[in-house]
């Protein structure tokens, strides 16, 4: 008797299994694409083909891991960001689509402030997987990019991504501005931890149990790192410069006030994301 192991049958069973266990059905398709080493179009073309026992065993193992709470990206070891594939593991935060909007906003400000051909120095503070630093370097090759993180494990992952995607970046270990002190910078970007500790009870177990808490949570209702950046950056920025940070959707006014206080002549703006929520603060210094 022939087993019902055609791709479409396996996908149907897996989707039902995930749904019954409170997980998103779309995870089944993403994991199956990874097992079959194909994309969405390729998966559609393989729907009538039989899966091997090895493929089935690997797929079922991955499904079980996801049901138990492990994010798909940590199972497959990859995540797409700005059209490129980044390696991720549990030492780094999984790159989010909202952070792509920080890239778009930063590039628009850079082109307006410095022109498209300017050679400028950019620092990405708290780089994690390197998504911001690598993307900025590849999108704006003239940038001299430095990326920092307090985690040696995160920097190791970021270095892998930079090497794999052929982005030349200076990586430095240390906390906040400490690794970039005693220099002047044209652009500083950061997506720091910004979730208040009391918000943990409202968060998904998938995030809480697997993503690094040092990359998620911060003291002072999630605002401490923005306050410290605003205090520490004035002496490090050139007279014409840009600071851009990603924020939690309730933090716009507080973060903007930090930067306005320490850069009184700057233009500070709160920018909403595609969903209409406050997501970025840009501080444009042009004295």
Image (cartoon, rainbow, N blue to C red):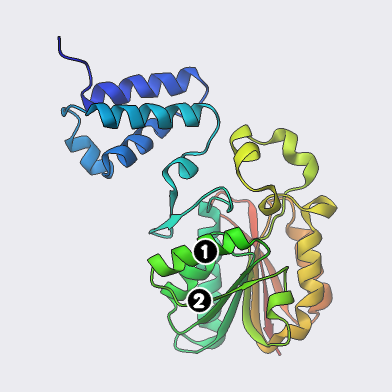
Left/right placement of residue 20 relative to residue 122 reads left
Answer few, some or many: residues within 10 Å of disc 2's Cα (few below 14, many 20 plus, some between 14 and 19). many
Q: What's the residue at 59%, 52% (across, down)?
A: 91
| 155 or 180, nearer to the observer | 155
Q: Quadrant of the image for the N terminus?
A: top left
* Rendered view: 166 above or below 1: below
Q: Please give the residue where the numbered disc 2 appears in the rendered image.
A: 169
Rendering coords of residue 142 (x, y %): 45, 85
Asked where in the image residue 49 lies, by quadrant, the reply is top left
Rendering coords of residue 230 (x, y %): 78, 72
Q: What's the residue at 69%, 83% (across, down)?
A: 285
Marks 2 and 1 in Cβ contact (< 8 Å): yes
Any mark on residue 158, and which?
A: 1
Rendering coords of residue 254 (x, y %): 80, 60
Rendering coords of residue 60 (x, y %): 38, 26
Asked where in the image residue 258 lies, by quadrant, the reply is bottom right
| 61 or 73, nearer to the observer | 61
- Of labels 2 and 1, earlier in sequence is 1
Q: CA distance from mark 2 to mark 1?
A: 10 Å
Answer few, some or many: residues within 10 Å of disc 1's Cα (few below 14, many 20 plus, some between 14 and 19). many
Q: Quadrant of the image for the C terminus?
A: bottom right
């Amino acid at each position: 008797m022939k087993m019902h192991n055609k791709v479409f049958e396996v996908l149907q069973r897996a989707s039902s299994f995930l749904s019954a266990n409170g997980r998103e059905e779309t995870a089944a398709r993403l994991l199956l694409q990874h097992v079959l080493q194909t994309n969405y179009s390729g998966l559609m073309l393989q729907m009538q083909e039989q899966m091997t026992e090895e493929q089935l065993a690997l797929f079922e193992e991955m499904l079980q891991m996801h049901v138990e709470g492990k994010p798909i990206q940590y199972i497959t070891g990859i995540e797409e960001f700005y059209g490129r594939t980044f390696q991720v593991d549990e030492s780094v935060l999984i790159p989010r689509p909202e952070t792509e909007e920080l890239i778009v906003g930063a590039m628009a400000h850079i082109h307006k402030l410095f022109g498209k051909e300017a050679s400028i120095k950019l620092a990405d503070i708290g780089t994690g997987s390197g998504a911001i630093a690598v993307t900025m370097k590849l999108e704006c090759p003239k940038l001299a990019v430095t990326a920092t993180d307090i985690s040696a494990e995160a920097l190791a992952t970021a270095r892998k991504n930079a090497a794999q995607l052929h982005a030349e970046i200076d990586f430095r270990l240390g906390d906040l501005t400490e690794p970039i002190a005693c220099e002047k910078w044209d652009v500083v970007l950061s997506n720091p931890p910004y979730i208040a500790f009391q918000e943990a009870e409202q968060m998904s177990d998938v995030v809480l149990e697997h993503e690094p808490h040092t990359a998620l949570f911060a003291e002072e209702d999630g605002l401490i790192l923005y306050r410290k950046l605003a205090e520490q950056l004035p002496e490090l920025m050139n007279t014409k410069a840009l600071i851009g940070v990603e924020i939690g959707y309730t933090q716009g006014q507080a973060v903007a006030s930090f930067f306005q206080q320490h850069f009184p002549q700057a233009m500070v703006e709160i920018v909403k994301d595609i969903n209409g929520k406050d997501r970025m603060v840009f501080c444009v210094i042009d004295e």
